[in-house]
Image (cartoon, helix red, strand yellow):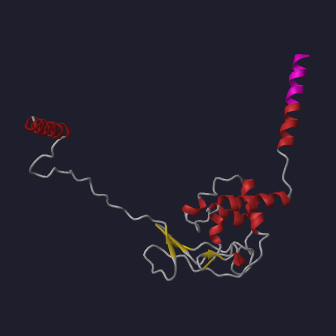
Amino acid sequence: MKRFSVLLLVAALALVFTGCSKRLSKEQMIEKGKYLVNACGVLKEHTPLHDGKPDMRKFMSGSNVGYAGPWGVYYPKNLTPDSDTGIGILTDEDIISEIKGDTGNVPGYFSDYYKNLSEEDLRCIMLYLKTLEPVANKVPADLKPGETVAGPVINLAPKAVTIEPLKKIEKPEGKKPASKTSTAKSTSKKASKKASKKK
């Protein structure tokens, strides 16, 4: 009887957990992917800038502004499903590998945000990207360290700042400033002399 009760409890728990891990529909995954892209923020850098602001007419179609660092200069790629300049010809797995940075095409500075996401999260992002409006936009080629840059660049490699040690403040030579106590004593002496003269 006891053994039957334990088996019954295990079966009930299995049903509960199976119900909790219900798979998302494709529409729900796309919605979740949109949320993740907006929440994480980094993928938004794949939108070109116009007059210093993101050009939302070309949302996620790659950036004309490079990001400089130890890797050289990286230009965020076109993530719209355009067949010539975007992800249109990539397989689902290729897109996920690119997001995670497994291909080596994306510096770790950017891919580190995404490589630890769950497989489901990455698939949601991939499905969302495939729903975007295809935009033909060829971004500049990435540059290796030391290569000449033509165009706007955001420097992500902070320069070393030399901080000088604090200098010891030396007191100026000469008379020491009178203390409040001595000033008070001299004032009282003058007052007593004046009082004795009046008498």
Query: x%, y% of residue 80?
Result: 72, 74
Query: x%, y% of residue 8?
Result: 90, 26
Q: Is residue 72 magenta?
A: no
Q: Is residue 145 left or right of residue 141?
A: left
Quadrant of the drawing holding the N terminus:
top right
Quadrant of the drawing holding the C terminus:
top left
Query: x%, y% of residue 102?
Result: 62, 62
**In the image, is residue 83 above or below residue 130?**
below
For this orientation, the residue located farthest to the top is 1
Q: State which quadrant residue 94 falls in.
A: bottom right
Q: Is residue 162 left or right of residue 184?
A: right
**In the image, is residue 179 above or below residue 74?**
above
**In the image, is residue 57 above or below residue 155?**
below
**In the image, is residue 120 above or below residue 11?**
below
Q: State which quadrant residue 32 falls in.
A: bottom right
The magenta span reads: 1-11
Q: Nearer the viewer, residue 18 or 32?
A: 32
Which residue sits at x=18%, y=38%?
A: 184
> Would you say the magenta stretch is mainly helix, strand or loop?
helix
Q: Is residue 177 left or right of residue 73?
A: left
Query: x%, y% of residue 192?
Result: 12, 35
Q: State which quadrant residue 48 falls in.
A: bottom right
Which residue sits at x=73%, y=79%?
A: 135
Q: Is residue 152 left or right of residue 58?
A: left
